[in-house]
Image: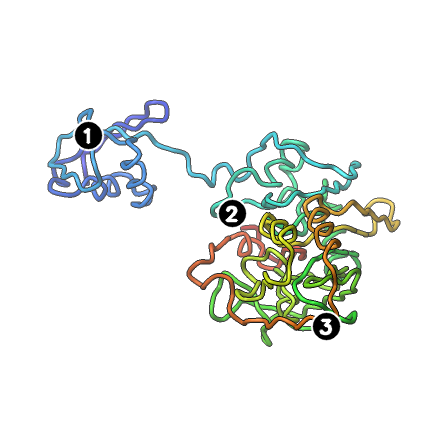
Amino acid sequence: MTDATPQSLSNSLTLTVPHDLGGLRLDVALQRLLPEHSRSRLQAWIKDGLVTVDGKASTSKTKVWGGERVVVEVQAKPEQHAFKAQDIPLNIVYEDDHILVINKPAGMVVHPAAGNWEGTLLNALLFHAPQLHDVPRAGIVHRLDKDTSGLLVVAKTLNAQTHLVRQLQARTVKREYRAIVWGQLWRNGTVDQPIGRDSRSRTKMAINRMGKPAITRYEILERFSVQTYLRCNLETGRTHQIRVHMQYLKAPLVGDPVYGYRGIVPIRSMTQTLRDAVSNFNRQALHAIKLGLIHPDTNEFVEWQIELADDMKVLLEAMRHEDVKEDEEEFEFSTEPYLSDEDYEYDDEDDDFDDLDEDDDLDLDQEEE
């Protein structure tokens, strides 16, 4: 076909452009010579100065005529870091030969996916317990959203993983959350509404009659001037379940950029102290505080409970200093989301686990991706 003869020089690749590619743009010619790399990836390397033509930096639009010596500094695909062990600190609540219980901080992604190939809980687990390389998904059986904090159990053996997954499928794992929502809820209740992909935006979940059953029980712990502090218990674990169900109640989580409403923050009803506390709270106010399950080795019920996350404690203290005004006019909820659909940043994490998530189960019948 072509007479290109790549030579491997550590992480560099040296090529001679064949004459039958003469007249093409540099990026197009490279795509013909290196079909294993996408054109967009090659363009990025050219832009970053990682490609030279006869010793000189070029642009993607540079024409080649044949005979040029092209050196490409090949960069590893980010996916190659997905299952690499990384020395990332873990807050371990409990560990034995069979399971590991983690207090996940807000901001940590559980499983690698597009945009988050490194620095995930999975990477940290592989460093902490190298034997997890031999367990599917490094023992992860359920997830928490990136900006949800709290308890998460990991299986350290294949037998333990199977045992935990069966419990999740049978809905016998007990999961309790703390949530701070906008508005004043007046009674305890249950949301029993199916959840599926939002028909208008695949980056989001929504109440969907064709979705999977989803049940969230909630209990009022404290009611403030413009917010409510809740205990939430999951009977099912669907992607973004609590966040979607709270939105359904028109009481979205404080700080939720996806399932909140644009016009609901009642600035005039808050002191400056509370305004500052809310503006400095940069995630959804959701924390997995309690976890209970049957131990896969002893078959005994075990349970763990941790403290509320520090940032939620600070937010609650600010709320407790507000006066609840019984005669204050209620503020109206808008159905406008904070962001338009095109503003949402899609996280393929949900697709990697389809049924796994804030708290969902690993489908053993699903092939490993």
- Identified by mark 3, the residue type is Asp
Q: Which residue is the site of mark 1?
A: 53
Is residue 130 in sight in this rendering?
A: no
- Identified by mark 2, the residue type is Ala
N-terminal of the pair, mark 1 or mark 2, is 1
* Cβ atoms at labels 1 and 3 below 8 Å apart: no
Find residue 276 and name its label: none
For the residue pair 280 and 16, the one nearer the viewer reads as: 280
Q: Residue at x 62, y 35 (%)?
A: 124
N-terminal of the pair, mark 2 or mark 3, is 2
Say which element carries label 2: loop
Q: Residue at x 68, y 60 (%)?
A: 237
Say which element carries label 3: loop
Q: Residues within 10 Å of mark 3 (few under 14, many from 20)?
A: few
- Identified by mark 1, the residue type is Val
Find residue 113 and name its label: 2
- Specify whether 79 is left or right of 46: right
- Specify whether 52 is left or right of 93: left
